[in-house]
Amino acid sequence: MREISRSFLHPNDIEVSISQVIDGIYRIAGYVEDYGITFNQFLIEDEKPTLIHTGPVGMYTKIEDKVKEVINIEKLSYVAFLHFESDEWGGMKFLKAPKTKLVCSDLSSKLNLTGWYNVPCDHISFWDNEILKTGKYAFRFIMTPHVHHWDSMMIFEESTKSLFTSDLFIQPGHNKPVISDDLSEAMIQLYRAVGIFGSEEPVRQTTKRIVKLEPRIIFPMHGSCIDASMFSSYTDAIMNNEFAYSGNILGQKVSIIT
């Protein structure tokens, strides 16, 4: 029988760093060697400070310490997660900011935050093209069902043209805050290995949509941020390669009975 671990993402195991990527937007990142990727959270410093992702349960204390380097944690207004998964918001239980509002997609609200024991139901949900203003920034919500999960969404900040893409545009490795190498092939290989997309079609439909936004910088949840000069390498890789599930889940073969 396989031994089950609650979490190997212990805070003593992972070094977390913070970098300002553009004015007022910070990347908080911890590299997890067992997965070979970084886990990124993004802090927006504004009149109503906002944190996108909280990180897994074991990492949150270190992530919170990095938030405190920029703002008073008591002033944190919003915490957003882009789909319902432990690395997206596993740290919510430890969030020491009582006035913070949880932000999610309307699908996450309906599918995941209703009827579960001990899940916070005091939250704000958004649908496609709705906007949350935090001061000088305005965040547009983009519904992207089945771009990893059925409740997935992305966020586009309109003044800086910053795009927060969750699990789209992953790059493996312990990379710099903003990438300077083309790791699009490594991204495709990772998607094939872990099998997180059931089909290429919804991913490609979403890719076509976000290309039209002409983002200046992309903030993936795993890997480095991508500026506009590199963006086409990653979108072309999505449009021109097969990468959907083909029998492997998280690197393990699954036998299909036919």
Image (cartoon, rainbow, N blue to C red):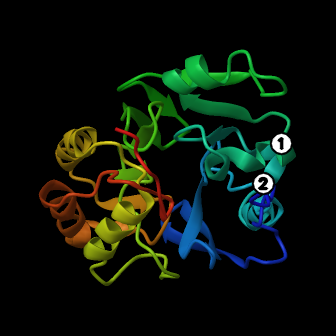
Above or below 177: residue 196: above
Q: Residue 219: percent from the left, percent from the top?
A: 43, 59
Side of 207 relative to 110 (left or right): left
Q: Is residue 42 visible?
A: yes
* Location of the C terminus (image quadrant): top left
Q: Is residue 50 visible?
A: no
Residues marked 2 and 1 touching at CB (< 8 Å): yes
The residue type indicated by label 1 comes to Lys
Q: Residue 86: percent from the left, percent from the top?
A: 67, 47
Circle 2 crowding by C-alpha within 10 Å: few under 14, some 14–19, many from 20 = many
Quadrant of the image occupied by residue 147: top left
> Mark 1 highlights which residue?
93
> Mark 2 highlights which residue?
57
Above or below 61: residue 11: below
Q: Secondary structure at mark 1?
A: helix
Camera-nearest residue between 256 and 40: 256
The circle on residue 151 is none
The residue type indicated by label 2 comes to Val
Q: Distance from label 2 to label 1 (Cα)? A: 8 Å
Q: Secondary structure at mark 2?
A: loop
